[in-house]
Amino acid sequence: MNATGFSPKSATTGDVDWEKIRADFPILKLKIDGKPLVYFDNAASSQMPQQIIDRLVRYQTAEHANINRAVHYLSEIATMEFHRARCKLQQFVNAEEDREIIFTSGTTDAINLVMHGYGRKFIKAGDEIILTTLEHHSNIVPWQMLASEKGAKIRVVPINDKGELEIDEYEKLFNERTKFVGLIHVSNALGTINPIKRMIDFAHRYSVPVLIDGAQAAPHLTIDVQAQDGDFYVFSAHKLCGPTGVGMLYGKATLLEAMQPFKGGGDMIASVTFEKTIYNTIPHKFEAGTPPIAAAIGFGAAIDYLTAIGIERIAAYENTLLDYATACLNEIPGVKIIGTAAEKTAVISFTIDGIHPHDIGTILNQDGIAVRTGHHCAQPVMQRFNIPATSRASFAFYNKKSEVDTLVAGIKTVQKVFL
Ligand code: PLP
C-alpha cells in the first residue's frame, strides 16, 4: 500500500487487451536458438514498444538540435519537447512544480547528485545516515563514500525472514544525530513494497530528509510525491519501457535550492567570470552540459505509453502473473522462493537446492528464458539470507501465463540436468 492507498492487490486489470499490448513490443517476437524469447528480466531493464521507438526516430529525423542555445527552428522544437518531457514527469509523480524535476543519467546518478549536492554540504562528522538492508548498491555506496569522507555513520534497518523491513527497529535508530534516510521503495532483489509513507512521516518528526529510491516502484505503483511527502524521489527510464541513459530526480524545491551543484559546466550557470560563477536556478543548476535530449523525450513518450494503459491496471495484471508463478514454483520440490512479503511487486527470487543460480540461468537461457542470476546489486540481502545469489524472474505487463508455464518446465529441465 502506498500513500495513494494503492496496492497491486486492490486494483483490477480492467478491460485491457493484453495480447494487443504485447504486440507493440517488436523484441518479444525474437527467437533465441529457435525458441521464443521469454523475457523475465524486466526488473533489470524493460523492453520498448514500437510507439517509443517511433518517437525516438521522429526526434532524430525531424527535431534534433541542441537545446536552450539558439533561436533557430530545430533548437526551439527540441527545447520545447525536452521541456514537455519534464512536465510529463512532473505529472507522473504529481510534483508541485516542473522545476522540481531534474534529468539525470539514471537512478544511480540521481542518488549521487543528492549525495554530492545535499550530503556533502549538510552532513557532518558524527552525523548518522539510515539505510535499509534492502537497498540496491546504488543507494549504499554513495552514502558510504560520504560517511568515510565526513566521519559520519551508517545505521541499517534489518529485515525479517519474509524480506520485510522491521519498522520498529527503524524507529529505534532515530536520535538527534540522525541527518538523512535513504530508503528503497520496492526491493529489486525480493519485490518487497516498503511502507514509505509511514517511514517518511516518522523521519520528518526528527526533521530528517528522506530519499526514496523508486527504481522498482515507478513501473508498478502510482507515485504521488506530494501525498508521500518524501524529500527526494529517483528512478530510471529504462525500467519503464524508456531508453537507457536517462532518469529523474524529484526534489522539493526548497531543498534543491539549498543544495550545491554536483557537476559544473554549461547551462548550469547564470554568469561566469574567472573571479566568480553565479549558478543558474533549478532545475538547470543540476543539469550541466548537453543533457540526454533524445532519451528524455523518449522518457516522456514512455510515461505517455504507460499512463495510457494505467499503472494500476498494469500492477493488477502483473499481480495475476505473480500469484500464478508463486503457486507454480511452490509446487516444485527443491525450489525455494526468497522474499515472501505480504506486499510485493511481480518479482520472484528463488533458489533450487543443490544448483548454483548461474547454472540455472545458463540452462534456462537454452530454452529462450531470460532471468537474472546473481546478487542483483543487493549483496546485503543475500548476506541476510545466507546465500550467494538467487535466480530472479521479474514480470512485466507484456508477459503472459503461458510464459510462466515455460519457466516452470525450464526449472524442471534444470533439475533433470543437475540432480
Ligand atoms: N535502485 C534500484 C532499486 C534498482 O533496481 C536499480 C537497478 O536495477 C538501481 C537503483 C540502479 O539503477 P540504474 O542502473 O538505472 O542507475
Image (cartoon, rainbow, N blue to C red):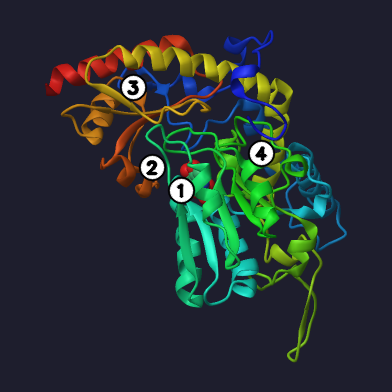
Examine the rendering and report whether any part of residue 385 can be seen: yes
The x, y position of residue 334, in whole percent, is 22, 20
Above or below, 43 relative to 182: above
Disc 4 and disc 1: Cα gap in Å? Answer: 30 Å
Q: Are marks 4 and 1 in contact (CB under 8 Å)?
A: no
Asked if the residue at tag 3 contacts the one at tag 4, i.e. Cβ–Cβ closer than 8 Å, the answer is: no
User: In the image, is the residue at mark 1 within 8 Å of ligand 1 by its beta carbon?
Assistant: yes
Q: Which residue is mark 2?
A: 376
Residue 236, picture quadrant:
top right
**What is the tally of numbered marks visible in this picture?**
4
Residue reaching furthest to the bottom: 275
* The label number, if any, that marks residue 368 in the structure image: 3
Q: On residue 293, which mark appears? A: none
Q: Residue 26 at x, y = what percent?
A: 53, 23
Asked whether disc 1 touches disc 2, contact meaning CB atoms under 8 Å apart, the reply is: yes
| Residue that numbered label 1 is attached to | 136
Q: Earlier in the sequence, mark 3 or mark 1?
A: 1
Q: SS for tag 1?
A: loop
| Mark with earlier residue (4, 3) | 4
The mark nearer the N terminus, 4 or 1, is 4
Q: Amino acid at mark 3?
A: Gly
Of circles 4 and 2, the one toward us is: 2
**Separation of residues labelled 3 and 1 (CA atoms):** 27 Å
Task: Measure the alpha-carbon separation of dots 4 and 2.
Answer: 30 Å
**Residue type at numbered disc 1:** His
Q: CA distance from mark 4 to mark 3?
A: 28 Å
- How far across and down, in percent of the image, does residue 209 sit? 66, 58
Which label's residue is closer to the chain start, 1 or 2?
1
Q: Which of pointers 3 and 1 indicates the residue nearer the eye?
A: 1
Residue 56 is tagged as 4
Label 2 crowd (10 A; few <14 / some 14-19 / many >=20): many
Which comes before the other along the chain, label 3 or label 2? 3
